[in-house]
Amino acid sequence: MDQNQIEQGIRLRKLIKALGLNQTLFAKSLGMTQPNISRMVSGEGKISVEALNRITGTHKRVNLHWLLTGEGEMFVAAATETSIQANEASRAYMAKGKGRLEDLEERVERLEEAVSRLIDSKGK
């Protein structure tokens, strides 16, 4: 296991506790399954880009920079310069860390769109 993954999992566990949730409720808040969250918390699996996006979409004050690197505070103050910089740094980190699964999901989406366009053009 990657040491960084383990450390991120520990921070994710702390975040879930700070939010007053358990893994099941946290997973439901993100529209994910508890086993997926469990793998991320244990360090067995990376925190996916999709999970990071869902965390920021649902729990808006979470500092992704802290979650990914351990630097800064767990939560950011709304609209402060520091939070803006931390979120930009987190997004840059996420963009670099995009995994094969996310790439494949994007390709499938593009293929589905192309097939849909072909079907539409044939029907005209």
Image (cartoon, rainbow, N blue to C red):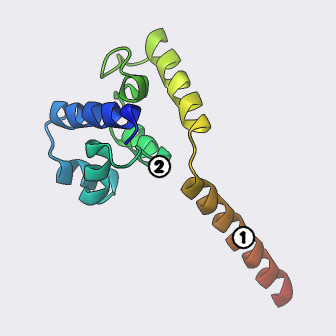
Tell me residue 83's x, y (percent): 44, 17
Identify which residue is drawn at 34% across, 33% down: 8
**Residue 53 drawn at (x, y percent):** 46, 43
Q: Which residue is mark 1?
A: 111
Say which quarter of the image contains residue 5: top left
Q: Which mark is residue 87?
A: none
Q: Position of residue 1 (x, y in %)?
A: 37, 42
Q: Would you say 96 lies left or right of 80 here?
A: right
**Alpha-carbon distance for marks 2 and 1?**
20 Å
Q: Please, is residue 102 above or below residue 90 in the view?
A: below
Q: Nearer the viewer, residue 100 or 19?
A: 100
Say if residue 56 shows up in the picture. Answer: yes
Q: Amino acid at mark 2?
A: Glu
> Around disc 2, counting alpha carbons within 10 Å, would you say few (fewer than 14), some (14 to 19), or many (20 or more)?
few
> Looking at the image, can residue 124 be seen?
no
Q: On the image, which quarter does residue 66 sit in?
A: top left
Q: Is residue 2 above or below residue 86?
A: below
Q: Amino acid at mark 1?
A: Leu
What SS does tag 1 mark?
helix
Q: Is residue 96 above or below residue 88?
A: below
Mark 2: which secondary structure?
helix
The residue depicted at 85 percent of the width and 81 percent of the height is: 121
Q: Residue at x 41, y 23 (%)?
A: 69
Q: Is residue 50 left or right of residue 9?
A: right
Left or right placement of residue 90 versus residue 14 in this view: right
**Which circle marks residue 50 in the picture?**
2
Place of residue 30 in the rendered image (x, y in percent of width and height, measured from the top left): 33, 51
Which quadrant of the rendered structure holds the C terminus?
A: bottom right
Q: Earlier in the sequence, mark 2 or mark 1?
A: 2
User: Vertical placement of 42 versus 70: above or below?
Assistant: below
